[in-house]
Amino acid sequence: MRPESPVLRLQAVTKSFAGRPAVDELSLELAAGEVYALLGPNGAGKTTTLNLILGFDVPDKGTIEVGGSCVTRDPVAVRARMAYLPETVMLHPSLSGMENLHYFSLLGGTRLCAAQMGRLLTEAGLPAAAHSQRTAVYSKGMRQKVGLAIALAKQAELLLLDEPTSGLDVSAANEFSQLVRTASGRGMAVLMATHDLSRVTDVAHRLGVLRAGRLVFESATAALSPADLEASYLRQIAA
Amino acid sequence: MNRWGALLVWELRQFAGNPVAWIVLGLLAAAMAWGACSGASLHRAQSQALAVESQADAAWLASVKERAQQYTRPSAEPLPYWQDPGDVAGFSRYFLRRHAFKPHLPLSPLAVGVSDLQPSRVPVKLETLFGIAPVYDFEPPRVLMSGRFDLGFVIAFVMPVAIVLLIGLLTTFERDRGMLRLVAAQPISPRRWLGIRVCSIAAWLLLVIALMLGGALWLAGVDPAAAPVELASAMALVLVYALFWVALSFAVVAAWPTAAGALGTLAAIWILLCLCVPLLGSAIVLGTVRAPSALYRIDALRRVTDAVEAERQAVLAAAFAGRADLAPHAGQIGRLDYATRQTFLVPERERRLAAQQHAVLNVKETRERATTLLGFVSPSLGVQSALATLAGTDMQRHRRFEKQVRDFQLHLRDFFFSRIQQQIVAPTPRPPGSYSRQNFSEFDAIAHFRFQDASAASRATAVLPVTLWLLALSVGLVGIAARRLRRWPADL
């Protein structure tokens, strides 16, 4: 799948810290419904890339557009069009999943009734019995489901995932993959920074490998078997 | 309701359901109630003491009048002048008993101020130099050293602790818990997100503090209708002071510290503003504006007293020579009684000590001006002084009282000295066969001290500069916070 009118477009984006490039001339495009896996070892620039897209950092060079709007020009407005799930979703422990969803919906600018919130949480895979429980008792997977419900509530065009399956057991990781596919099926573009190669072939349409901030390899996942992917990845990061 | 209004309502509800917030505010309420009751109890005791002293003055005068009446009966026994209330000189020296009272204002439980350090009842004697004898002992030194725990203290020092604690804890929660990244990914600016949070805390704080202050004063027995202007000014001052600490805390948490970092920074600022600046300022004022020492003053007083006594004849001769009515009676100088002599010698002692007294008053005024200025550097000091002003327990009111006591003393001197000295020129003939001299019977014409207080409006006006200054500082601090909040923290 090639993007016709990309939801996300990065053009020659460069960001350096103390003279050392963290992201170097990175160009990337994602179309609606496309899942892109950004691979790379620690320090390769995956999180910096996400930070730049979220507008937490400003690129030294290059442009980032989400739905045609420039991130650096108006990051707050652009954030309304994207959702983000950090590696570990932390919520207000004294509030229930429903109350957390209500709070983040208010922050996101959407106002939902209890029925809508319940539907979103269920859609994100959270059992109904847990909706009203304090999130202090939630597992990491359950908190991620609330995070996904927050993303769904925003009706975002772009979903950014940072190591989404890290720390999840196999069943929860599988469940999460299914949720990503659901999000993609609803037309959401998904950019996923991950180490989990097995999950990449499972959910991503395309992948790219970052090394020292440069995109050194890019491929459609359909063109690679899991073994080929692993071999290519190891070759790229070792080069 | 728009999106931000809905978020504000959500934050207000979160505060309302937060047990930590209510524990902190509950402790503050208890401290306020205790402080108000402590101040009210002191002032009740002082007011009772004034009433008792006033009754004792009246009882004493009644008894003196009765004795004077008794001594008018014919008798062959001589009566020395110091035992004769019907002798104007004897009365003025040995029977005159008048107190000047500084009554408490209705809002006095707001602050003890200097009411436990400065006398509110002063015996007015004709011979006391410059009106007030610097001797009083109302409270045990241990109580004076530790200071009174009053409402003013709670407002100036404890309330800021509660405010910084709540803002420090309730605005750093997301950062400490690792939630801030998820919050920052939402379409809301850091300025708006933290601003709404701080606004909701401030709204609760201002409401609860206003209720607490009203409740504490009610508990202390203050009648709001008795001092509406002062009460409104006090309420405005306290709320603006609370707003200042909210704004200061906002400026600190706008740098995105952790809870520990925020509380550490705010604690350091509290120590600096509430303790270090007043102590340092006080040390600088005491070190630079030097007054003659108490020992030096006592020594000077003794020297002047001895010198005037040694030169008594010359002083009296000069006084007689200087007045046309007395000059022809200079021959009586050697036969004047002690009380009559004092009518000439006391003003002479005051004349010789006037320069030193002037210097001491100058130093006091300079130090008080410096303390007022220091109140603009240390808000806690400024607020404590302003609360004392509204409560009527401030130094300025006491100075006004002292000045009026001195004026009253001079008025009494005029009344008595003229009558005593008239006896030199034209002595009243002693009634035949009487114990008493009977040259004085105007007991009811002796003036009573009435303290002329400043108006409520002038007290409210006096605290206006501090209130406006705190408001300006608050606006400036909110501006600093807004500038800092242009971006989310770099290390999200």
Image (cartoon, coloured by chain):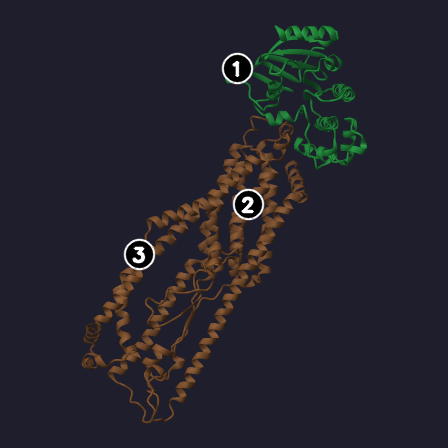
A233 left or right of B479 in image? right
> Do the dots labelled 3 and 2 sit on one chain?
yes
- Circle 2 or circle 1, nearest the eye: 2
Q: CA distance from mark 2 to mark 1?
A: 44 Å
| Kind of element beneath mark 2 | helix
Check the image and report above or below for B368 versus A131: below
* Residue at 63% across, 26% down: A79
- Mark 2–mark 1 contact, CB under 8 Å? no
Q: Quadrant of the C terminus of chain B?
A: top right
- Circle 1 or circle 3, nearest the eye: 3
Q: Quadrant of the N terminus of chain B?
A: top right
Structural crowding at the residue carrying mark 1, measured as other residues with C-alpha within 10 Å and reported as few (<14), some (14–19) or many (≥20): few
* Chain assignment, label 2: B
Check the image and report above or below for B279 versus B416: above
- Mark 3–mark 2 contact, CB under 8 Å? no
* Chain assignment, label 3: B
The shade of chain A is: green
A187 left or right of B222 in image? right
Please give the residue where the numbered disc 1 appears in the rendered image.
Answer: A20
Please give the residue where the numbered disc 3 appears in the rendered image.
Answer: B292
Residue B289 in the image: state x and y as whole percent.
33, 51
Residue A132 in the image: state x and y as whole percent.
77, 36
User: Residue B161 shows which numbered tag?
Assistant: 2
* Residue at 69% across, 24% down: A156
The shade of chain B is: brown
Residue A96 in the image: state x and y as whole percent.
74, 35
What amino acid is at disc 3? Pro
